[in-house]
């Protein structure tokens, strides 16, 4: 099963993919605390969708398991999985642990 | 001489992979063979076995009306290619019957295949198109949306939904240089059409501004137009054949 570092790397890569499409003056500051969704989020809605698609695909490739980050359960979490990179990582690890 | 002008250039689809649903027969097969003939590669999704023998044709047995089957089809497709450039959402089922006696299962099947299937295929394909920053999604609509013939309540509704699907996705996918359009075809001699009463079809045809059946090239002409490089600025449009509007 993927560990925390591996999931971190996948999410950070997805954010780097967004930066690859942006100009030098529009680069996101990427860290484990990067806000993905909400008032202080650094991503616009389409960029967030792109990150979700990339992360879902990469998790599937790496683990052999399909996960959904946008189903009802994800949206009803007390703490949004998209609060920041750490929160998303924790949610993905939870899903993977259940799938196992 | 006229024909030489209207036909697409040799190799017009070279370097492109088109995913066509319902590729085994009818309109889907016509489009698939056309793209193959003009240098493209084609992936076909259909419930049955392949009916096309060509080195650049890849067949996947997929039930378009089943979301899980569509996702399995894409998993298999991604082993063949990492890029889908053109999608033709053609697969459809038709039961024509008065709504009061339409079996709910038949209505549900039309909803699943004609609309939900197109959504799922567009959803998965657009993830691939996003990476290559190029794509053409072409939904095969129907004159039934405009003509609203008796018996076609659910069929026409699903085809109307198909155009709305394209129009909304056109907005969502425009940043990725992906266009989404609908081709509203008129009656063409296919297995699907043969299921309908011939007198009813004749009546519909007679009421068209151009009162004849569609020919394959009528459809291919618009597919070529929508799929072309030059149509990058054509999106969220529905083009009807035969003068239907």
Image (cartoon, rainbow, N blue to C red):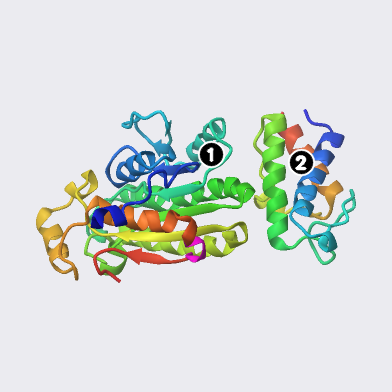
Range covered by the magenta-colored residues: B231-235
The secondary element bearing badge 2 is classed as: helix
> Does any portion of residue B225 appear in the rendered image?
yes
Task: Using the image as rendered, state which of residue B26 and residue B106 is in the foreground.
Answer: B26
Q: Secondary structure at mark 1?
A: helix
- Measured as percent of width and height from the top left, residue B189 is found at 19, 49
Residue B15 in the magenta stretch? The answer is no
Quarter the C terminus of chain B occupies: bottom left
Residue placed most toward the observer, B7 or B184: B7
Residue A92 circle label: 2
Judging by the rendered image, the residue that carries numbered circle 1 is B71
Question: Which residue is situated farthest in the left direction here?
Answer: B199
Main secondary structure of the magenta stretch: helix
What percent of the width, then of the height, locates residue A90? 82, 43
For mark 2, does the 10 Å Cα neighbourhood hold few (<14), some (14 to 19), or many (20 or more) residues? many
Classify residue B60 by image quadrant: top left
Q: Nearer the viewer, residue B183 or B100?
A: B183
Q: Chain of mark 2?
A: A
Q: Please check the rendered image and state whether residue B232 is part of the magenta-colored stretch, yes or no.
A: yes
In the picture, the disc for residue B236 is none
Q: Chain of mark 1?
A: B
Picture coordinates of residue B39, whole percent (x, y): 41, 40
Mark 2 or mark 1, whichever is nearer to me:
1
- Residue shown at 58% from the left, 62% from the top: B174
């Amino acid at each position: 099963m993927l560990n925390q570092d591996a999931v971190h790397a996948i999410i950070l890569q997805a954010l780097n993919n967004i930066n690859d499409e942006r100009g030098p003056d529009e680069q996101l500051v990427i860290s484990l605390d990067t806000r993905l969704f909400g008032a202080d989020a650094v991503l616009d809605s389409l960029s967030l969708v792109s990150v979700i698609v990339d992360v879902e695909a990469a998790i599937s490739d790496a683990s052999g398991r399909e996960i959904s980050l946008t189903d009802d359960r994800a949206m009803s979490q007390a703490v949004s999985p998209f609060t920041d990179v750490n929160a998303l990582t924790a949610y993905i690890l939870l899903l993977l642990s259940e799938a196992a | 001489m006229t024909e030489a002008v209207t036909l697409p250039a040799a190799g017009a689809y070279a370097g492109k992979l088109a995913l066509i649903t319902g590729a085994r027969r009818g309109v889907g097969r016509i489009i698939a063979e056309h793209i193959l003939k003009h240098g493209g590669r084609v992936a076909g999704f259909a419930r049955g076995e392949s009916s096309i023998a060509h080195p650049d044709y890849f067949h996947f047995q997929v039930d378009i009306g089943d979301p899980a089957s569509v996702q399995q089809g894409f998993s298999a497709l991604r082993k063949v290619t990492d890029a889908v450039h053109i999608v033709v959402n053609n697969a459809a089922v038709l039961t024509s019957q008065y709504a009061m006696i339409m079996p709910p299962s038949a209505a549900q099947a039309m909803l699943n295949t004609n609309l939900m299937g197109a959504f799922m295929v567009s959803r998965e394909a657009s993830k691939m198109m996003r990476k290559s920053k190029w794509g053409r999604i072409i939904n095969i609509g129907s004159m039934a949306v405009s003509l609203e013939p008796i018996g076609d309540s659910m069929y026409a509704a699903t085809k109307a939904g198909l155009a709305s699907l394209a129009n909304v996705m056109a907005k969502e996918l425009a940043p990725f240089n992906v266009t989404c359009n609908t081709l509203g075809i008129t009656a063409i001699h296919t297995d699907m059409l043969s299921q309908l009463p011939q007198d009813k079809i004749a009546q519909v045809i007679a009421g068209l501004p151009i009162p004849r059946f569609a020919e394959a090239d009528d459809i291919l002409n618009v597919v070529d137009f929508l799929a072309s490089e030059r149509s990058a600025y054509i999106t969220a449009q529905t083009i009807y054949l035969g003068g239907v509007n």
